[in-house]
């Protein structure tokens, strides 16, 4: 048996298929990572790092660079929107961000700084 189709039916089927593809793509879209710059004041010549949930708390994963012009250490990390806990590691000593009032107590009895990326 042969089925007759008209030209009017074909475009409607194609439009439905295109919409389905767009919807599936929208559901799988990942949040866009943003550059977040961490800064801390420390004496020149120190070994300064930023560690946090974004790098599995690795104390040497993200080295910070000293700027003689500003007198601070800085490091930029790409982060997707969300909330992250972090600390600075200065010559092996872990310290919360002294310029960030947002913090939470950790299981070590100290505090982690918190940043919210929007």
Image: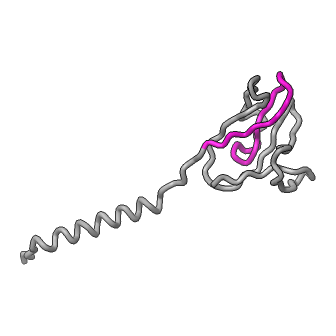
- Residue found 41% across the figure and 63% down from its top: 24
Q: Position of residue 28 (x, y in %)?
A: 47, 58
- Residue ranking furthest to the right: 109
- Residue found 75% across the figure and 29% down from its top: 70
- Residue found 73% across the figure and 31% down from its top: 63
Closer to the camera, 70 or 14?
Answer: 70
Relative to residue 40, is residue 21 depicted above or below? below
- Residue found 57% across the figure and 47% down from its top: 33
The verdict on residue 1 being magenta is no
In the picture, residue 39 is in which quadrant? top right
Q: How many marks?
A: 0
Give the position of the N terminus as an image quadrant.
bottom left
Side (left or right) of 90 relative to 82:
right
Relative to residue 70, is residue 118 depicted above or below? below
Q: Position of residue 50 (x, y in %)?
A: 76, 38
- What range is drawn magenta here? 35-58
Side (left or right) of 65 relative to 24:
right
The verdict on residue 50 being magenta is yes
In the picture, residue 71 is in which quadrant? top right
Give the position of the C terminus as an image quadrant.
bottom right
Q: Position of residue 80 (x, y in %)?
A: 61, 50
Relative to residue 13, is residue 114 depicted above or below? above
Closer to the camera, 73 or 1?
Answer: 73
Rendered image coloring scheme: one colour
Relative to residue 118, is residue 10 depicted above or below? below
In the picture, residue 48 is in which quadrant? top right
Side (left or right) of 10 relative to 111:
left
Q: Position of residue 17 (x, y in %)?
A: 29, 66
């Amino acid at each position: 048996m042969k089925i007759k189709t008209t030209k009017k039916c074909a475009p409607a089927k194609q439009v439905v298929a295109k919409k389905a593809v767009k919807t599936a793509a929208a559901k799988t879209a990942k949040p866009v990572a943003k550059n977040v710059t961490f800064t801390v004041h420390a004496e020149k010549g120190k070994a300064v790092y930023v560690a946090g949930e974004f790098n599995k708390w690795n104390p040497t994963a993200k080295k910070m660079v000293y700027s003689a012009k500003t007198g601070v250490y800085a490091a930029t990390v790409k982060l997707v929107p969300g909330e992250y806990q972090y600390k600075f590691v200065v010559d092996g000593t872990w310290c919360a961000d002294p310029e960030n009032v947002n913090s939470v107590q950790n299981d070590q009895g100290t505090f982690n700084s918190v940043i919210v990326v929007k």
